[in-house]
Image (tube, grey):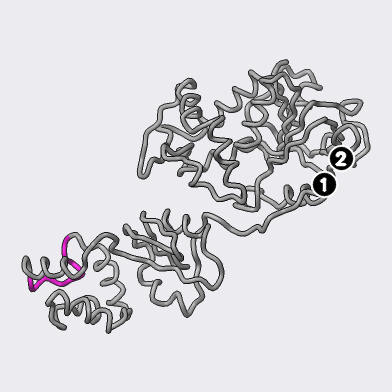
Amino acid sequence: MPYRLATPQLARCLAADLGGCKRDFPEFPVQRCALGEAGLFGAMESFDCIIIGAGAAGMFAAIEAGRRGRRVLVVEHGAAAGEKIRISGGGRCNFTNSGIAADRFLSRNPRFAVSALKRYSQWDFVARIDRAGIAWHEKTLGQLFCDGSARQVVEMLLADMAAAGVTLWLACEVGEVRRGASGFEVGTARGVVRSRSLVVASGGKSIPKMGATGFGYRVAESLGVPLTETRPGLVPLTFAEQELAWMVPLAGVALAGRVSCGRTGFEEAVLFTHRGLSGPAVLQISNYWREGQAVRLNMAPGLDVARHLKEAKAASGRQALRTAPGWGAARAVGAACRDGFRPDRALGRAVCGAAGVGRAQGCGLGV
């Protein structure tokens, strides 16, 4: 079956016998059809599988179903497929990680990740990237990025969908979803379509500016599928004004640190922002933090502070602490000290006392 880029715009061009369309289609109003009406192009269409959402999960599912001989329709309310892929990794798509393992996933059923990774691992996807001729490189902590644009990954998935005979409807809103005796009926802006199987891959509420909604949750509830607690994940931490005061002078400062909550911690980059904390370590800990719990930030992980201060004093006793080489945390906090921030004095005195650094020599930390 040929691949059909079935947008309403393209359908109008073909109906007008224009012999082709430009890559950028003109704006046309999308006609909406209530559930139960025939489609815009005749009788209600039927498929083996309907997939709602043309993100990474939706396209991947469509490809596998199409390769198994299923007649597949993917319905996407956005104007393009794979938009979150396009912006991921700063536009270079951090498409997988060399250190993926089952214990790295958060789930109420930990065995699911074990089963899934045995069937398809990160190396299977890397091989797929290689077959597509997409160059890539490894960065910090096993992160794999494209050398070029993230669009290469989107184009690879679209090409795989084409080869699998998948039908794609873009800029097509989805309405009511019903379950019947023989399958599902899905109301769309192009009319009602039927299928024996339905995959809801519309994502969660993250990045609403890109059109993300809670549609998938509503469909699940309407079909009697139970939901677990939903909350933000992999997000920065923001603070109330009274807690934020000491961080504001540090906005824009990035350093290697360890962020922990309870027994869980991550050691990676930490970024101070005007609203709180961000960076990879903070995004990771946000999955574990719950309201009322303390979050700890160590700005010198693996460093014996007292010993470091002793060595700095011996090497250059008159140098200001905040300018000492190799002491990024002191430079960061030193910048805040100039704007009135003062860390706990008792703690500062204890550290400086252990290092044999006098009070005047330690004033860069406000002790």
Circle 1 packing at 10 Å, graded few (<14), some (14-19), many (20+), is few
* Of the pair 186 and 8, the residue shown nearer to us: 186
Picture residue at 59% right of the left edge, 58% below the top: 232
Most foreground residue, 214 or 111: 111
CB under 8 Å between discs 2 and 1:
yes
Tell whether position 56 is magenta. no
Q: CA distance from mark 2 to mark 1?
A: 7 Å
Q: What residue is at 63 percent from the left and 18 percent from the top? A: 163
Left or right of residue 188, residue 341 in this image = left
Tag 1 secondary structure:
loop
State the predominant SS element of the stretch in magenta.
Answer: loop
Query: Which residue, given by chain and number where applicable, does mark 2 sit on?
Result: 179
Bounds of the magenta span?
317-325
Name the disc covering residue 223, or none: 1
> Can you see residue 31?
no
Q: In this orientation, which residue lies closer to the viewer: 310 or 82?
A: 310
Residue at the location (93% across, 36% down)? 37
